[in-house]
Image (cartoon, grey):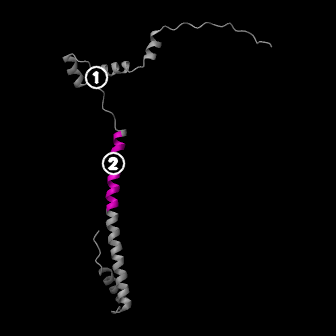
Amino acid sequence: MKTIAKNELFDHLNEFLQARGIALKDGSYANRIRKGCDLLADAINATQGTLEKARSQVDTKLQQLRASLHRATAPKPPVMKTAPGEAAARESGAKPASAARRKAKKTARPVAAKRRSATTAKPKKKVAARGPTRR
């Protein structure tokens, strides 16, 4: 919006009052009305500037929100069986990245877990069911 000049409101008010038959002559009463119109014009101009800044900030935040929603809800691209990097690695004899990840997971296990999995589990003895005991 356009900014309002300081004397613009007073001029329009003066024209309105003259159309109604009231004339504002120079004096203390007219000076106070002029100062009030100047303050009102300054407040309106400041509000317009603040509103434009707020509107631009809301627009940027809304764009960020739309982008994050799009990223979260967009369909995933189809999974390729072999990635271009893996095909070149296989030709050169290097292990693919997935095999390296599996090996890293195996080496990251604690030693106690390896011992448990290495020992064979012994079958538990079955306990014969007894009737209620009396005391």
Residue 68, x across and y down, in percent: 35, 43
Residue highlighted by disc 2: 64
Q: Write down the quadrant of residue 24 in the picture.
A: bottom left
**Which element is circle 2 on?**
helix
Amino acid type, residue under disc 2 in the picture: Gln
Q: Nearer the viewer, residue 76 or 92?
A: 92
Q: Which mark is residue 58?
A: none
Residue 129, x across and y down, in percent: 70, 9
In the rendered image, residue 20 lying in the magenta stretch gets the answer no
Crowding at label 1, few (<14), some or many (≥20) Cα neighbours within 10 Å? few
Frontmost of labels 2 and 1 is: 1
Amino acid type, residue under disc 1 in the picture: Ala
Q: Is residue 61 left or right of residue 84?
A: right
- Report, in whole angstroms, how far the alpha carbon at label 2 lies from the one at label 1: 33 Å
Residue 98, x across and y down, in percent: 31, 22
Q: Write down the quadrant of residue 44 in the picture.
A: bottom left
- The boundaries of the magenta stretch are 53-71
Residue highlighted by disc 1: 97
Q: Quadrant of the N terminus?
A: bottom left
In the rendered image, residue 59 lying in the magenta stretch gets the answer yes
> What residue is rendered at 58% in x and 8% in y?
124
> What residue is rendered at 28% in x and 72% in y?
3
Looking at the magenta stretch, what is its main secondary structure?
helix
**Which element is circle 1 on?**
helix
In the depicted structure, whether residue 24 falls above or below residue 43: below
Crowding at label 2, few (<14), some or many (≥20) Cα neighbours within 10 Å? few
Q: Write down the quadrant of residue 29 in the picture.
A: bottom left
